[in-house]
Image (cartoon, helix red, strand yellow):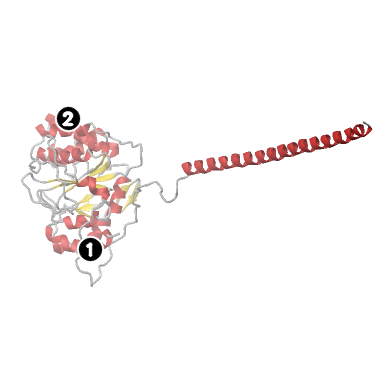
Amino acid sequence: MGNEHQQLPMVSLFFNSKLVLRYGFHLLSFVIGLSLGITVGFYVKSSLFSLQDDTISFITHPSAAAPPLLVTQPPTPAPSPLPEPSSASASPSLSPLPNVTLASRDKLTLMHGMDDNELFWRASMVSRVQQFPYKHVPKVAFMFLVKGPIPLAPLWELFFKGHEGFYSIYVHPHPSYNASVREDSVFHGRRIPSKAVEWGRATMIDAERRLLANALMDSSNERFVLLSETCIPLFNFTTTYSYMINSNQSFIASYDDPRKVGRGRYNPQMSPAINISQWRKGSQWFEVDRELAVDIVSDNKYYPIFKEHCHAPCYMDEHYIPTLINILVPEKNSNRTITWVDWSKSGPHPERFIRQDVTLEFLNQTRFGTNCTYGGNLSSMCFLFARKFVSNTLQPLLLLLSPDFSH
């Protein structure tokens, strides 16, 4: 019995020590687990924030390998006199124009079934000043009022080459003209529905309005210039484009001529809608902005008066648009044309130029031989185009102008 009582404390001590070790082990395991949990949780949280930052960075900062496409206007270079052509230079041969995606939309046919009344009505409903929710490239509409072919087309091909997307072309020939145009030409598919035109008659104005109305259907067209088959460009495309696009005025010759060929053509029966103080004379070859183009096409007040009362020796193409703009918005007009012609010889038509007339001195005098105002400043660059050049001037024009046009 005595030995049994002596062994009890030892057994109790043994079991108490074992219990302490077991609780200590559990406590140590809990501390290790807690530490491990905190560490893992912090790591996961950091990873999530890092992933979120990377995701936001990817959304707000797209890869530099695919920047947004921005189309910019060509810069305006300072025009300079034409250089002497190299003695070894031959007449440049033009290669076919490449097929450019930007121009594919313009290659669609412009033919349609609308008569003039519907066409002018639709054109008068377009927006005068276009507002776009995206960046767009303003275009210049080159409108050719011609009898048939364009003999100087190779020069114009060179002028337009490489600038697809900055221009539109519209051609109004005599309706009987049916010659085909090669598919790689800038003039291919650019013919509009046309009617016969008589010089000095209302049909001339009808053709001009028809060209404007068709060009207004393209919302990107912001400037509109009227040309003929005898017109040539005097500067390269970039200079010409920038001159028109950057101007805050239109270019319509409109002046009060007190002579018989001016005020002497006024018909008093036009009063009171048009009085003699509003009567103006000017050149047929104009350049206008979009707002004035809409004004000309939508005019139903003054055009009928001119059509009824302006007959020879009154010529509508010399008086209608100059007088209309003088009545509506004279402040938006520069009162000068940008198409040069030679009226130095008397007669109803300006001087024609043949092959022998085309020299370096002649072209430079035409380009810089006049002073005018542009953008509020005095300038010697007053004309962008010139006429009347016959077909045999093509080769010397290509020889002298191609170095400038290739820039």
Between residues 98 and 46, which one lies in front from this camera angle? Answer: 46
Residue under pointer 1: 400
Q: CA distance from mark 2 to mark 1?
A: 45 Å
Q: Is residue 208 above or below residue 303?
A: below
Which disc, if any, is residue 187?
none
Q: Amino acid at mark 2?
A: Asn
Can you tell which quarter of the image residue 261 is in? Answer: top left
Q: Which mark is residue 300?
A: 2
Left or right placement of residue 365 versus residue 16 in this view: left
Quadrant of the snapshot with the N terminus: top right
Task: Write the residue at 25% across / 60% down.
Answer: 364
The location of residue 407, given as percent across then percent down, is: 30, 59
* Residue 46 in view here: yes
Extreme-front residue of the structure: 1
Residue 262 appears in the figure: no
- Residue 50 % position (x, y): 56, 43
Determine which quarter of the picture holds residue 129. top left
Identify the residue at the far bottom of this view.
88
- Please name the amino acid that badge 1 sits on: Leu
Considering every residue shown, the one lying at the far left of the view is 176
Measuring from the top left, give residue 179's x and y in whole percent: 8, 51
Crowd around label 1: few <14 · some 14–19 · many ≥20 (10 Å): many
